[in-house]
Image (tube, rainbow, N blue to C red):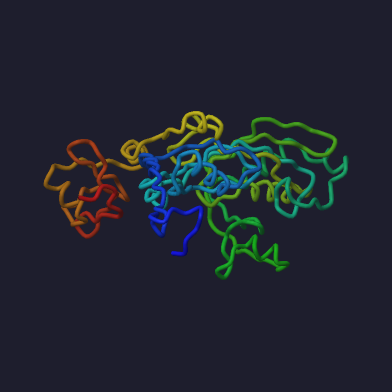
Amino acid sequence: MPECPYWPADAPDRVPAVSRPKQPRKPAPPPGLVVVDKPAGMTSHDVVARARRIMGTRKVGHAGTLDPMATGVLVLGIERATKLLGHLALDRKTYLATITLGASTTTDDAEGEFGDRADAAQLAAVTDEAIAAGIAVLSGDIQQVPSAVSAVKIDGKRAYARVRAGEDVVIPSRPVTVYRFDLLGTRREEHGIELDVVVECSSGTYVRALARDLGAGLGIGGHLSALRRTTVGPFTLAKARTLEKLEESPELSFDLDSAVAAAFPRRDVDQATARAVQFGQKVAAAGIDGTYGVFGPDGRVLALAADEAGTTRSVVVLLPA
């Protein structure tokens, strides 16, 4: 190395790198479910992104999507509990909704473009008895055409994406069940007739399509103006927390064991059977219909399983050996 007045002759050619102490990695949160009370204006994906920051993990997913305008119960899976999301029995949901009769929209809700509005005479001609009869027609087992801007796939592409691309979308009807469609209150306003309702329905039912079809049946158009989900499967608002509350206390609503116990039938097994289940081996059938949780002698959940041809098959192993 050439001599330098600022560099001692006996100094090393390279300055050793300064070693910095490694920052300890934040431990991953325990697996389980978080039940969020989703605010209006956020997509379900927005809620997942916020929950990832709050819970300190990328392993967050959601079940039972809610539209941005809707509020209420949204179930999130954390860490290994994301494996539960595709198997949760979320086939029954309850909503509080406000339906506005007197105008239809391009999205069947208040966020779309409005079409023709009914005039005062047309609104006055719609009796309470006619509204009750229209609701009765849309109750029970019905055929429903989902909204054109729904997430239903048409030839492999979401319907809403085709609509945004300017395509004409025709969605076939499909069977759904409306277990309950009760009218809670009626307000006759200058711009329309507002109905507060409670709807309990099967998965895949669009409440905004009910609003659309009720208005169409009455001849004055209709759309959904407010929606709040109060239950999805076994999960209710009683266990739900706002994102602000979750930020203050980032804790699970259900740990993995209690989540499976709440959402699935339970099967308790002995130690030998537990070991076989943890290795993904088949064991004797339990005689339980559908998917159920398998729990070891210590009360911890081992897997989701289902009976098949006289044996039990592990659907997903949650606690491998």
Give the total number of marks visible in the rendering: 0
On the rendered image, what quadrant is the N terminus found in? bottom left
Q: Give the image location of residue 74, x and y in percent.
A: 51, 41
244 vs 21, left or right, is right
Residue plotted at (58% across, 46% down): 46
What's the residue at 43%, 33% (across, down)? 251
- Toward the bottom, the furthest residue is 155
Residue 92 spot, x, y in % from top left: 48, 44
Residue 6, position in %: x, y?
51, 52
* x 46%, y 43%: residue: 76
Furthest toward the left, the residue is 272
Nearer to us in this view, 45 or 197: 45
Residue at 36% x, 42% y is 31
Q: Nearer the viewer, residue 241 or 157?
A: 241
Residue 70 as seen in the image, left or right of residue 23: right
User: Residue 313 appears at what percent x and percent y?
Assistant: 24, 56
